[in-house]
Amino acid sequence: MRTIGVRHAGATTIDGEDAVYEIGSLTKPFTARLLRLLVEDGVVGYDDPVLGPPVSGRPFTLRELAEHRSGLPRLPRRLERWNRKDPYAQFTADRMPEVIAATAPKRAPGGKVVYSNYGYGLLGHVLAEAAGTTYTELVRTRITAPLGMTRTGLDTPGLVQGHTFSGRPTPPWDLAALAGAGGLRSTASDMLRFLAAEGEQPSLAWFKAPGKRLMHMHDGGTGGFRSFALIKGDSAVIALNNQARRVNGAAFKALRTAEASTPALPA
């Protein structure tokens, strides 16, 4: 099953069932937005250091976590054997001190961008601690409730069945204390609300589409789902799939179709 939502020229369309999907790493823009909101409120600062195994004489910062410049590896050091059907469940809140101590940066902070799921999971964990709450509650109070996103969260009911690349049913993932890296569930309609808000000022999590300066993108994936989002000015596309097969191409096609059929309104 696949759902594609498009927001263009003031109109919104949903192609497919507006169901609940795991959005995987599309959670990262939520975590980066939380960072910006907490900085604006004076709760944290972009250059606040994050304690952990030191490298090159200084710790990495919250900004470096959000920009994938912390030097941390893509994945945390595992505490036990990986369970491919639920690989992050072992990283519970009570074990985070052990994870932080065991997962040293691979390079000095502030260098080139090296994508890190662990870095974003740690960012979400640190922000929740700084705000004195949980990541779940922080997302709810600072993002989903203000934007009217009623079907987005870590445990949103009604999740459709996910499938592997080959089409076999697979269980949902539990990102535990690293939920900020990819633990959210959402719908196409909710995601279009979020993308509209992000389009006004894209957070640090977004990547610029190659050769397209005004287009930002991010994808996501779990064991049984794939997602992809585009923001281009006032337009946005979200593509969701309950099978571990990429939907990037479908999202770009949906945007081209919308632009061809309904030209964007002048700024």
Image: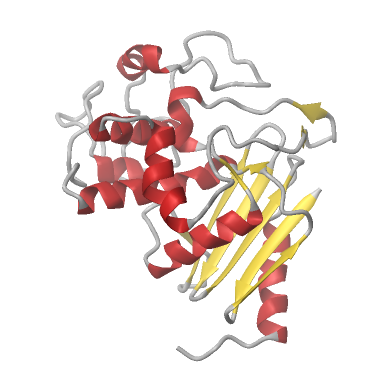
Q: 17 or 124: which is nearer to us?
A: 17
Residue 222: x and y, percent?
A: 64, 35
Q: Is residue 53 visible?
A: yes
Residue 185, horizontal then vertical, whole percent:
59, 41
Q: Nearer the viewer, residue 206 or 213?
A: 206
Judge from the rendering whether residue 6 lies leftward or rightward of residue 118; answer left or right: right
**x 60%, y 44%: residue:** 23
Q: Nearer the viewer, residue 144 or 180?
A: 144
Where does residue 221 sit, x and y in percent of width and height?
A: 63, 40
Residue at x-position 54% and y-position 19%: 89
Residue 194 higher or lower than 141, as above or below: below
The answer to whether 247 appears left or right of 71 in the picture is right
Up/down of 139 relative to 256, above or below: above
Judge from the rendering whether residue 174 lies leftward or rightward of residue 105; answer left or right.
Answer: right
Relative image position of residue 151 (x, y in whole percent):
59, 46
At x 44% / y 50%, what residue is drawn?
A: 145
Quadrant in the picture for residue 8: bottom right
Q: Note whether residue 110 is visible.
A: no
Residue 198 left/right relative to 166: left
Q: Residue at x 53, y 61 (%)?
A: 193
Tell me how many marks there are.
0
Camera-nearest residue between 107 and 63:
63
